[in-house]
Amino acid sequence: MAIKIMIDAGHGGYDNGASYEGRREKDDVLRLAFEVGGILEGMGYDVEYTRVNDVYESPVQKAREGNNSGADFFVSLHRNSSANPNQYNGVETLIYDDSGIKADMAENINRKLTEVGYRDAGVEIRPNLAVLRRTRMPAILVEAGFINSDVDNELFDNKFTETAQAIADGIDETIKMSGLTAQVFAMDDTFDDEETYYNEDMYDEKEPSEEEGYQILTGIFRSLPSAQYSLNSMENMGYYTAIYEEDGLYQVRVGMYKDIEEALIAQKQLRDKGIETLIVRAED
């Protein structure tokens, strides 16, 4: 049986992801997913997609789809963004931890993309991302350049096929170097099926440490799409933002601050921007 790869185009539906001058992350990565998937199919891999049109599914749902599909690898495609246009550029790949075949795959994809012309922004450990933590197979999240970088957008548009080929080649090279020729990754029973709603690039559950005790509440909404819109707005301003569901309502919270003094400074900055805020304990 051929090795199966689940390709995840990030965001979708009412969740546009990052945007820049009318350009939307959800559109770029869906096109890229089809291109990468088509190349991998031509290489002999069995390819499935978490979405094939403009629909929203939570990161937890996407992880569950990957698990239920029996895929051997999970590859989530995104585009990065920064607080200010043209502040950064380059490709970055995220992994749960720096071990195993996923770490090799992340390094190989970045290396292949630098051959296309992208700057290598490195491999980052992100253990709390839903699509990395809740998947039972090796999983990576590729940030295919910054969507608010003119340099990266020119590469993405003018070398689109080469970009997709580089990602596919990085995957293929890693698998071949490992000696795998068929489905080999057994599913385990550690998947936590608790439903949570977050942006693709946010933590899939809050795990405040002893040094992280406060967040800033910026809105409470009756519908998830409204909360997601607010989250995207805050993210575009450069804030770490997440959504928490409680009693059928959706709270949008900013930051994770270890003490009240830090939270008060951040709250003042938000209020200076005209945003109503309330400081809350992270565990509330």
Image (cartoon, rainbow, N blue to C red):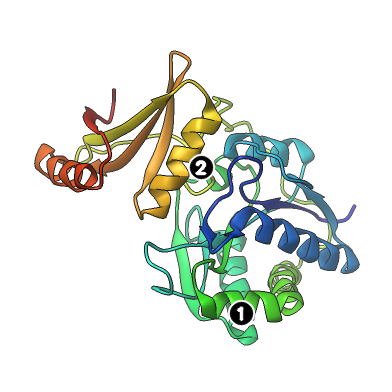
CA gap between label 2 and label 1 equals 26 Å
Which dot marks residue 154?
1
Q: Secondary structure at mark 2?
A: loop
Q: At 74% across and 69% down in the image, what residue appears?
A: 168
Q: In this view of the protein, which residue sits in the foreground, 263 or 191?
A: 263
Q: Is residue 41 left or right of residue 63?
A: right
Q: Horizontal placement of 123 versus 154: left or right?
A: left
Sequence-first tag of 2 and 1: 1
Residue 112: mark in rendering: none
122 in relation to 212, above or below? below
Instruction: Say if residue 110 shows up in the picture.
Output: yes
Q: Residue at x 77, y 46 (%)?
A: 53
Image-based side of 275 in relation to 186, left or right: left
Q: Eyeballing the image, is 173 above or below 252?
A: below
**Image location (x, y in percent) of residue 224:** 53, 28
- Residue 103 percent location from the top left of the image: 55, 64
Callout 1, which amino acid?
Answer: Glu
Kindly identify the amino acid type of the residue bearing the numbered disc 2. Answer: Asn
Q: Quadrant of residue 23?
A: bottom right
Give the residue at mark 2: 199
Quarter in which the C terminus is drawn = top left
Mark 1 is surrounded, within 10 Å at the Cα level, by few (under 14), some (14 to 19) or many (20 or more) other residues, namely few
Counting from the top left corner in percent of width and height, residue 137 is at: 65, 48
Q: Residue at x 49, y 73 (%)?
A: 149
**Residue 73 visible in the current orientation:** no
Mark 2 or 1: the one toward you: 1
The local crowd at label 2, few if under 14, some if 14 to 19, many if 20 or more residues have their Cα within 10 Å, is many
Secondary structure state at the residue bearing disc 1: helix
Seen from the viewer's position, the closer of residues 79 and 174 is 79
